[in-house]
Amino acid sequence: MSNLSAVGDRDSWRCWLCDEPVDPEASVNSDRGPSVDLGVAKPKKAAAGTERLAHRACNTRKGAVKPVVPWSPEP
């Protein structure tokens, strides 16, 4: 499941890092726009179903800020 809309719908359009709403209509280039967090550093490949919805800015700085919602080891 890497389709942004599918991940957003599954995660109820909430950022897993800050637990704030994500606007599905926002530009993916906007800091508050939607992005898919694969939870792994490239070049590793994420297991199907492990993606999480995040604001673009939250996803970018996730190494510097502790997530509000823990990353589940379960898909």
Image: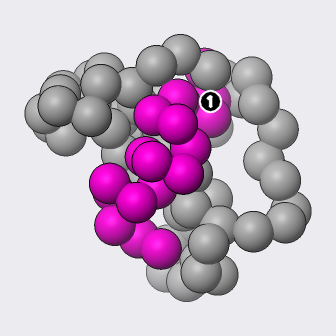
Q: Residue 49, percent across and down?
A: 62, 72
Whether residue 50 is in magenta: the answer is no
User: In this orientation, does residue 4 appear?
Assistant: yes
Residue drawn at (32%, 54%) of the image: 5
Q: Residue 24, percent across and down?
A: 27, 34
Graded by Cα atoms within 10 Å as few (under 14), some (14 to 19) or many (20 or more), the crowding at tag 1 reads many
Indicate whether 45 appears above or below 33. Answer: below
Instruction: Give the quadrant of residue 48.
Output: bottom right
For label 1, the SS is loop
Residue drawn at (39%, 26%) of the image: 22
Indicate whether 59 appears above or below 23. Answer: below
Judge left or right: residue 30 versus residue 21: left
Residue drawn at (86%, 62%) of the image: 73
- Characterize the magenta stretch by its predominant secondary structure: loop
What quarter of the picture does the C terminus occupy?
A: bottom right
Q: Residue 63, percent across and down?
A: 63, 37
Q: Which residue is mark 1?
A: 17
Q: Nearer the viewer, residue 28 or 10?
A: 10
Residue drawn at (60%, 20%) of the image: 18
Instruction: Give the quadrant of residue 56.
Output: top left
Q: Residue 31, percent across and down?
A: 27, 23
User: In this orientation, does residue 37 appear?
Assistant: no
Whether residue 11 is in magenta: the answer is yes
Q: Could you tell me how many numbered marks the image carries?
A: 1
Indicate whether 52 appears above or below 32. Answer: below
Q: Amino acid at mark 1?
A: Leu
Judge left or right: residue 50 versus residue 26: right
Judge left or right: residue 11 versus residue 55: right
Q: Magenta stretch?
A: 1-18
